[in-house]
Image (cartoon, rainbow, N blue to C red):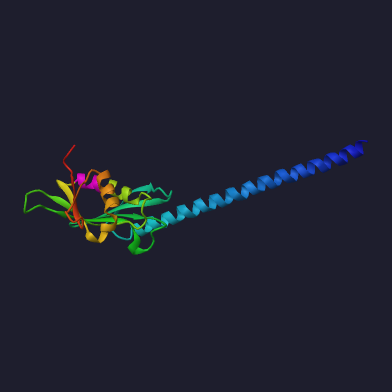
Amino acid sequence: MNRIKRFFLNKIFKNEIREIEGHYRKNADNDIRKIRFEADQKNALLAEIRRVFVDKNDCILAIEENKRGREVIVTKRISYDSIWFMLYGVDYRAINCHPRIMATFHDGYDNNESYIVIDDILVEDNNIGNGSILMKYFIDYCKSTSAGYIKGMLSSVDKDHFDRSIHFYEKYGFVCKLNTEKSDGSIRLDLRCP
């Protein structure tokens, strides 16, 4: 009777042990894949950081996470009166596709008040937070300068999505004005207001 009992117990436990082993092996394989993916992402981000340091004028301000869950490196480049805020990341390796704000500082010789003009904002991926990340750092920088305000244009080239642009700017306190034909407009943010 003991032999028969042992035989069935060994069969039962072998099957259970195989099931448990398979379960743990599957979980371990998934964990290994996840760890490798995360390591690859961190290595790619490190490669992007190295790219930033190629240009001596670039300064890394922070690493942020956009709504897509991707880490992006926030950089600032100041060269004479040019101001650039850009995002580097594994999704933005091509030179011309970095989300960025390009602006120019004006000393205000004509009206005695310095100001900053937003020349262009380029963000190819909409609604994932890259523009918001850039704008937050850009406005913080502008407040640290002697500029009294930021201004810019709503170009007729972008008139198909003025509503989205206006919503974006107003979210950061800009006053947006369209001309009567609603074909172009202007934006302005006073930096000295509380």
Q: In the displayed structure, does residue 46 sit left or right of residue 142?
A: right
In front: 157, or 43?
157
The residue sitting at 58% across, 50% down in the picture is 32
Find residue 182 and report its horizontal and vertical position in percent: 20, 55
Location of the N terminus by quadrant is top right
| Residue 193 colored in magenta in the image | no
Looking at the rendered structure, the number of numbered marks drawn on it comes to 0
On the image, the x and y values in percent for residue 159 come to 25, 57
Residue at x-position 67% and y-position 45%: 23
Q: Is residue 117 left or right of residue 68?
A: left
Prevailing SS of the magenta stretch = helix
Q: Residue at horizontal 37%, vertical 63%?
A: 94
- Please give left or right for residue 182 compared with residue 94 in the image: left
Placement of the C terminus among the 4 image quadrants: top left
- Image location of residue 53, percent across then percent down: 33, 57
* Magenta stretch bounds: 137-144
